[in-house]
Image (tube, rainbow, N blue to C red):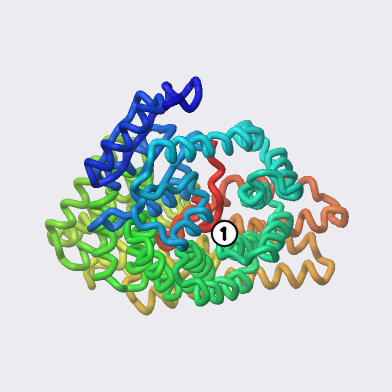
Amino acid sequence: MQLLDRDIHLARALIIDANPTARSVLAGQLRDLGVQQVRQMSRVQDARTVLEEAPHDIVLCEMNFEGAAMSGQDLLDELRREQLLPYSTAFILVTGDASYAQVQEAAEATVDGFLVKPCSGLALAERLTEVRRRKRTLKAIYEAIQARELLRAAALAEQRFVARDSYWSFAAQLAAELWLRTDQPQRALKIYQTLIETRPTAWARVGVARVYLATGDLPAARRLLDELVMQSPEYADAHDLLACVAVEQGDFAAALTAFRQAANLTPGCLLRMQHLGALAFYQGQKDEAVQQLERTLALGRRSKLFDLGCLLLLGLLKFDLRDARGLVTVTEQVLALSEADPASTRLRRVRRMLGGLSAVLKQRPDDALGVARELAAEVMAPDFDLEAAALTISLWARLRSGEVPLKEFDTLLRAAGLRFAVSKAAIEMLVAATDDQAPAIETLRNCAAVINNIAEQAMSRSAAGQAAQAVEMLLDQGEHTRNARLLEMAGAVTRRHAEQLADAAALQARVTVLQEGWCAPLTHIAGVRRSARAPGGVVLRT
């Protein structure tokens, strides 16, 4: 058989199929096409780790693995969602049962190709040729992305979409994603709406919801997604994004329900598994939390998608179950991670918290209180984030009754509450960390009310033409509490009224200094990652 191209002998291929005969046939066909480096794997979980660690040019993956939680589609979605599959990789799903729905789902997920067993060498060659042709056609767009020229890449992709050139549908997805990434959501919205007029696909409607989320219109995003999951209940990304929106709104109960649906649809998805376990913990569903987090640990501890927060929450759950041996096991795994990354402040705090919990179980109250005080002393430190506040409150809430200096605990709660009352979601996360202690919950909610009152007073002054007083108030209170919401509001008011402020430059300089010190973005809320690609988005592979 003729070689695909002159460089095909340099390609690295991976075949993932539980059937050794099927693997052998595909490997032979690839070698006939000139691919010399062919690796075979039988388990999808092992393949995920291999693909995370090293790039491959060609991946042929079975669609369904009998008895396995993760399908080939799940593997593809997760790798692309978390930016772990480079553009150069041609990912082709192979199956013996290709219904129209499956093929359509694969096409909308931007899988590179779909082959039905038994497939001939000619069919494989045609599919790979088409994949490589598409990559060549869109090369200019991806080169711009790789050069970090996202505006140029967006313009090129949109131009192809408008002209209805080859691969215009995929170019439209890229263009919309790029406009979102470059803070131009209205341009993305226009593309999604045009696509919906042509054919109202679920992924395009999720795109509209992402625009609403990007512009801060959470109610509109929630309404659209509630409607979409009713109409397309099998579309996991819709449930996933609905859960993320609910988390942002502080509605953890709805988020938990949505993550359950997403996880049930994609039971092998490691990230959704982690998110489900975390939300179950924060909603007090401890049995479900243990099940999901232990499963995450068993299936994905070596994965790049595995998050330390899984061990943090498992440690708290083992303590609550009075499982001393389980707590030791979790601690040992954190220690192993610490040896690999000794400079990690996050690991140090988690390790200290687990040590404090262990001291409580061993009836060493002085040691436990010492650890709790050590963590509380950092509450105003620049790198003390929302997760650190939650784990510190969790430890204090679990000290034995009668051994807790209530005044010190209240001081911690007030400091953390005032600092992290930046949204309803953040406060609800701290509330969930109190282990249902009513006085602690009341203190945290009062802190949120204080911050809301300061913000309202400042906005009233700004509306009354007293912009300078509003900015000074926000800066003074923001500096005192370290509250990022107040500091960001100070910056917004300063920019809005710059022409009316006599000392606008000085105020902006102060705003900048304080924001650089205290306005680090929240990367997690209630164990849900906020830094990864939004569900339903297109991976900008390079």
Name the residue at 43% across, 66% down: 429
Q: Position of residue 102 (x, y in %)?
A: 44, 59
Q: Position of residue 486 (x, y in %)?
A: 63, 61
Residue receiving disc 1: 483
Quadrant in which the N terminus appears: top left
Q: Nearer the viewer, residue 417 or 385?
A: 385
Q: Is residue 408 above or below residue 44?
A: below
Q: Quadrant of residue 218?
A: bottom right
Label 1: element kind: loop
Answer with left or right where residue 155 lies relative to residue 116: right
Q: Nearer the viewer, residue 67 or 370?
A: 67
Report the amino acid beneath label 1. Answer: Asn
Mark 1 crowdedness (10 Å alpha carbons): few <14, some 14-19, many ≥20: many
Q: Position of residue 59 (x, y in %)?
A: 39, 39
Q: Is residue 15 above or below residue 285?
A: above
Name the residue at 36% across, 56% down: 269
Quadrant in which the C terminus appears: top right
Q: Quadrant of residue 395?
A: bottom left
Can residue 407 be seen at all in this image of the molecule?
no
Q: What is the count of numbered marks?
A: 1
Q: Position of residue 299 (x, y in %)?
A: 26, 51
Name the residue at 53% across, 34% down: 132
Can residue 4 be seen at all in this image of the molecule?
yes
Q: Quadrant of residue 148?
A: top right
Q: Nearer the viewer, residue 330 or 302?
A: 302
Answer with left or right where residue 59 lies relative to residue 356: right
Answer with left or right where residue 8 lies relative to residue 154: left
Q: Nearer the viewer, residue 293 or 14?
A: 14
